[in-house]
Amino acid sequence: MISNCRKPPCATCSVEELGRDVVAELADAGYRGLVTVKSTVEPGTTDTLQKLYPDLRLAFCPEFLREKAQYVDFVEYHHVCIIGAHTDGDYRTVCEAHGSLPKHFAKMTPLEAELSKYFWNVFNALRIVFANQFYDVTAAVGADYKTIKNALAKHPNIPDVYLQVNDNFRGFAGNCLPKDTLAFAQYAKDKLDPSLGLSLFDGIVEINRRYKPTVL
């Protein structure tokens, strides 16, 4: 399994290095087993690499781990294992590699699995940005953000995750959320039809820059 979390400047840097330095080496060495990529990569990467190296078996299985709690999240809070595989056999192999740790398994295409990782990180970044903006509203009108948030968090539709905000606890930081949110914003802008109007993702990045980076 291949896993890597790198910083900007570009989302495709790690993809190109992955293809050149790891997958290519395995192919040149005559490896015929299953290669499972777990790093965040640009959507479509696994399929592209599969075409370049047809003798390899490639799958994509994203991780959903907090930077400071990777072991605990993998072992104790492994709610779902998403597997993007080309065959049922490869899907079963990745399932077996994870044993009984995941509570649920989900099979999909590699492209869908790659997008799932971005969905997770970008949505968490959005929650943090929303919380910061709403905190600013409450501060401006003399209301208590925590009182509002704690009351609404009792409803199952609003889990109290990535909504903590105070004067010393503001924008998202770390190695993955900033990198992946920026990368997805660039992907949406550069690779997709502008008529889709996908301005939200750029907005998340821009708004977060107003706040001190503190949330990992």
Image (spheres, helix red, strand yellow):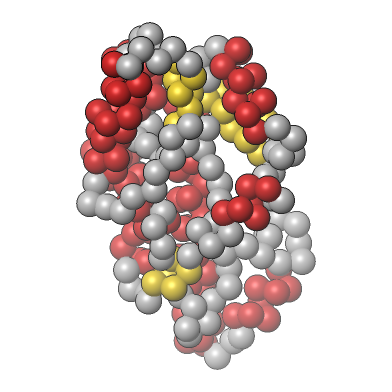
Report the residue that reaches farthest toward the top: 55
In the rendered view, tell whether residue 86 sits above or below residue 175: above
Relative image position of residue 92 (x, y in whole percent): 64, 19
Q: Position of residue 187 (x, y in %)?
A: 30, 40
- From what the image shows, is residue 126 above or below residue 98? below
Q: In this view, does 149 lie to the left or right of 203?
A: right
**Residue 139 location (% of width, % of height):** 51, 86
Residue 140 seen in render: yes
The residue nearer to you, when weighing 131 against 16, is 16
Q: Residue 113: horizontal and vertical position, in percent?
A: 50, 31
Which quadrant holds residue 211? bottom left
List the single residue furthest toward the front: 29
Whether residue 48 is visible: no
Residue closest to the eye, 8 or 57: 57
The residue depicted at 65 percent of the width and 55 percent of the height is 72
| Closer-to-camera residue (22/12) | 22
Question: Which residue is at 77% across, 66% downward?
Answer: 154
Q: Could you tell me which residue is drawn at 76 percent across and 62 percent down?
A: 155
Going 43% across and 65% down the picture, which residue do you hit?
172
